[in-house]
Amino acid sequence: MRVVVVIFAALMTLGLAAFGVVAAQRAHTPGSPFALISHVVPAAQPAAQSTAGVPARTPVSQIAKGPVTDTSLPALSPLPTPGSTTAPIRLAENTSPPSSPAPASAAPAPTPSSSIPACDKPGGMGLSRVVEIDTTGGPAFGAEHFKQYDFLRDHEVVLTFDDGPWPENTPAVVKALTDMCVKGTFFEIGEHATWHPEISKMVAAAGMTVASHTWSHKDLARKPYAGDIEKTKDEIEMGVSAVNMAVGAPIAPFFRFPDLQMPAEAIAYLGTRNIATFSTDIDTFDFKIHKPDDVVKSVMTKLGKAGKGIILMHDFQKATAEAMPEILRQLKAAGFKVVHMVPKQPVTTLAKYDDMVKAQDKFSSTNNTRPESSVVKTINE
């Protein structure tokens, strides 16, 4: 009896071994159910085996830029379903380790305009923020007339200057701002810009925002401009063209009305040109002040009450130019911060008004078309 049991056990062992061989062969047969198992659960690799052929996973930053083309997953054989000859597609996570870590550059490097350079001037103030103004539709700013767009935080100021460019005074204002590493917005009169284009260029080269303030500083709420939109357009557009020509590059589509007299029809027209209107939060009335100390007092007293604001001054005024270094020192001491405004898009001038400005130069000559460097040359010095 014992002999029979031993023989039966031997036969069972041989049968199981044969079944294992058959199963192993079927595992390598295309379309076999066993093939799916070999793909989804890969066989463990020896520690010494190279994984250089396994591609690393695509970083998220690259996925956001275009379609996913990850080919690191092996092709899966279809999984048969009862009663059908077509199997559904099945996805599985690739559990094989990547050959190398994903790139560390997840975040793009900041562009030069995305941060404000540190102030390198002794005792300098520096800008706290730069804000971009989208002038589409002609938005209006300045709480004295407009309440909607109050973008300044507590103890923030925007420095604006009217009526330039003017010899000595405008350069002095720009120097004071530059010495403290801050910037302002200059609303220039077109006629003044044609008289002193070199100053307009200097203002823009210093990184200030240059905008327009009409052609000849006319009160557009009075006749002959009041009620005559064509005359109003001439005064506005010639100013834009003249300042643009003086700078030699597109200026900001920002505009301030002389004496802050703003007819509704003129504001509506600026909207059609995508030019923003600027009133003010704090009018210093520096054009009535003749002593620098009194200009400083006017600025700081009004600002102390308001706590923040767009400040209106005049680089045309000598007292203001002389007061600027002290104004900036006191702003810094009182904890105020300067915000600089820049446009999203530059202004576009109209050819008709460009020609009107050119016609104002009665002594222009068609002979003067060559650049100065080719006409005048220093040969001995």
Image (tube, rainbow, N blue to C red):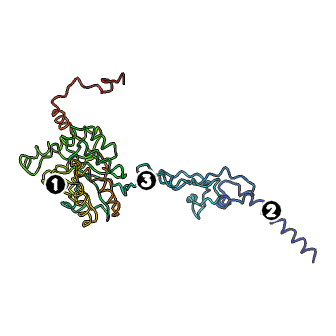
Give the quadrant of the N terminus.
bottom right
Of labels 2 and 3, the one closer to you: 3
For the residues labelled 1 and 2, say whether their Cβ atoms are less than 8 Å apart: no
Above/below status of 260 relative to 335: above
Question: Foreground residue, 245 or 320?
Answer: 320
Question: What residue does disc 3 label?
Answer: 118
Label 3 is placed on what type of residue?
A: Ala
The quadrant where residue 42 appears: bottom right
Question: Foreground residue, 46 or 221?
Answer: 221
In the displayed image of the protein, which residue is found farthest to the top? 379
For the residues labelled 2 and 3, say whether their Cβ atoms are less than 8 Å apart: no
> Is disc 3 surrounded by few (<14), some (14 to 19) or many (20+) residues within 10 Å?
few
How far apart are the two marked residues, 1 and 2, measured between alpha carbons?
A: 110 Å
Question: Foreground residue, 30 or 170?
Answer: 170
Above/below status of 128 relative to 3: above
In the displayed image of the protein, which residue is found farthest to the left? 223
Residue 281 seen by the camera: no
Question: Foreground residue, 338 or 261?
Answer: 338
**In screen coordinates, is 335 left or right of 281?**
right
Question: What residue does disc 1 label?
Answer: 288
Label 2 is placed on what type of residue?
A: Ala
Question: What residue does disc 2 label?
Answer: 18
Give the mark nearest the N terminus, 2 or 3: 2
**In screen coordinates, is 177 left or right of 57?**
left
Give the mark nearest the N terminus, 1 or 2: 2
